[in-house]
């Protein structure tokens, strides 16, 4: 399998009072006005262009780190899709039996793996953010953004809210224009009211035949919402965060990050870190053969780790900030344990 060639175009803009007023609701008139503002900005300002080469193994690794759905080999799925739609039915990616069923079988024998396309788009977004100097912090599940990343500039940690969109058909410019209104409303909702340095990244990707990847990235400066508070209580996140496949180390890193960020009293960030700690602690207990009976046992494991790290007071302060979200975390643990003990995957 050949490497992928990524052509990245980066546009930058900042939220001001006018854009803030447009990003207030889902009103069709305001949405159109906001899209027009962004289109005018893209037309009047020159972007940065960058080119990268991504090996298939590397793209699959990014899929596992940034993708919301697990895909074993997104690169193989992409290759097979383009071979089939371009009628290369005797290529290595298309088994002969699949070609026979595709041509002669009843019904629709081949269905594109949309989960692979989505995960690959999120992987490209993560790849770009790391090239910009960020590292993955947390991957929210089921809600925007697709990733929250962190990076240091001028001695202060900046938090990137990253949303990814991908297609094998739509041009990247159209993808961006279709998703701009929701993106601006979502990043405003998360950045407004807190004093940390938030930024928004909307990364739209189109995959084409021959390993060609075109990405259009819109960077949005959200300092309009912090209003100078960043200088009063700058955020500092040090070190790296262990990946999800090392849950014990990841739990310790998440607790450390909350201790480092607790002084900013950012409820949104604290709730994300708490949810991530809950997931990591649950996985760590299962990995160690000590399957928890409920949320209380997971919570005790987190508090014990915080005590070992001498960060109990910082963890306590953070948990006090988000008391209203703890019931949701407990429900997530209960649901996860029902899945673990149950038999949802049994065939009918």
Image: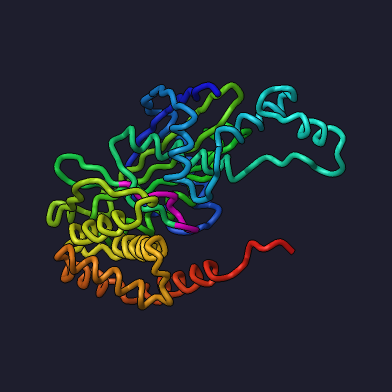
Question: Which of 34 and 344 lies nearest the eye of the viewer?
Answer: 344
State which quarter of the image contains the C terminus.
Answer: bottom right
Query: Magenta span has 146?
Result: yes
Count of numbered badges drawn on the protein: 0
Across and down, in percent, residue 345 comes to 64, 61
Across and down, in percent, residue 112 comes to 68, 40
Q: Residue furthest left?
A: 232
Q: Residue furthest front?
A: 289
For the question of whether residue 306 can be seen, the reply is: yes
Q: Residue at x 31, y 43 (%)?
A: 135
Q: Main secondary structure of the magenta part?
A: loop
Across and down, in percent, residue 228 comes to 18, 52
Q: Residue at x 38, y 59 (%)?
A: 189
Q: Is residue 305 above or below residue 196?
A: below
Question: Which of 85 and 161 lies nearest the eye of the viewer?
Answer: 85
Query: Magenta span has 348?
Result: no
Coloration of the structure image: rainbow
Question: Which of 293 and 101 lies nearest the eye of the viewer?
Answer: 293
The image quarter containing residue 103 is top right
State which quarter of the image contains the N terminus.
Answer: top right
Q: Residue at x 33, y 62 (%)?
A: 277
Question: Which of 119 and 167 lies nearest the eye of the viewer?
Answer: 119
Q: Residue at x 40, y 46 (%)?
A: 162
Q: Is residue 239 left or right of residue 280?
A: left
Q: Is residue 83 left or right of residue 286?
A: right
The image quarter containing residue 12 is top left
Q: Is residue 199 above or below residue 174?
A: below
Across and down, in percent, residue 225 comes to 28, 54
For the question of whether residue 275 can be seen, the reply is: no
Q: Which residues are magenta?
A: 141-149
């Amino acid at each position: 399998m050949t490497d992928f060639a990524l052509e990245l175009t980066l546009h930058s803009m900042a939220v001001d009072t006018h854009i803030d007023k447009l990003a207030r609701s889902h009103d069709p008139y305001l949405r159109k006005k906001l899209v027009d503002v962004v289109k005018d900005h893209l037309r009047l300002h020159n972007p940065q262009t960058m080119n990268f080469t991504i090996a298939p193994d590397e793209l699959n690794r990014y899929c596992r780190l940034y993708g919301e759905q697990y895909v074993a080999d997104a690169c193989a799925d992409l290759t097979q899709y383009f071979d089939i739609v371009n009628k290369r039915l005797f290529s290595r990616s298309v088994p002969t039996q699949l070609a026979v069923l595709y041509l002669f079988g009843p019904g629709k024998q081949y269905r594109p793996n949309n989960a692979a396309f989505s995960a690959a788009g999120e992987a490209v977004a993560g790849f770009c953010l790391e090239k910009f100097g960020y590292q993955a912090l947390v991957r929210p599940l089921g809600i925007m953004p697709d990733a929250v990343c962190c990076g240091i500039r001028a001695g202060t940690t900046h938090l990137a809210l990253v949303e990814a969109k991908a297609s094998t058909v739509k041009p990247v410019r159209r993808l961006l224009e279709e998703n701009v209104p929701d993106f601006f409303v979502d990043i405003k909702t998360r950045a407004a009211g807190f004093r940390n340095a938030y930024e928004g990244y909307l990364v739209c990707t189109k995959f084409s035949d021959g390993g060609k990847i075109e990405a259009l990235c819109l960077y949005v400066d959200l300092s309009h919402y912090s209003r100078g508070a960043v200088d009063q209580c700058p955020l500092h996140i040090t070190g790296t965060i262990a990946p999800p496949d090392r849950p014990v180390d990841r739990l310790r890193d998440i607790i450390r990050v909350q201790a480092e960020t607790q002084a900013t009293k950012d409820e949104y960030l604290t709730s994300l870190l708490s949810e991530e700690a809950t997931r990591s602690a649950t996985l760590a207990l299962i990995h160690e053969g000590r399957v928890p009976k409920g949320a209380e046992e997971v919570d005790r494991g987190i508090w014990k780790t915080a005590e070992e790290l001498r960060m109990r007071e910082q963890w306590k302060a953070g948990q006090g900030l988000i008391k209203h979200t703890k019931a949701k975390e407990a429900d997530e643990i209960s649901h996860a344990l029902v899945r673990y003990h149950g038999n949802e995957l049994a065939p009918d």
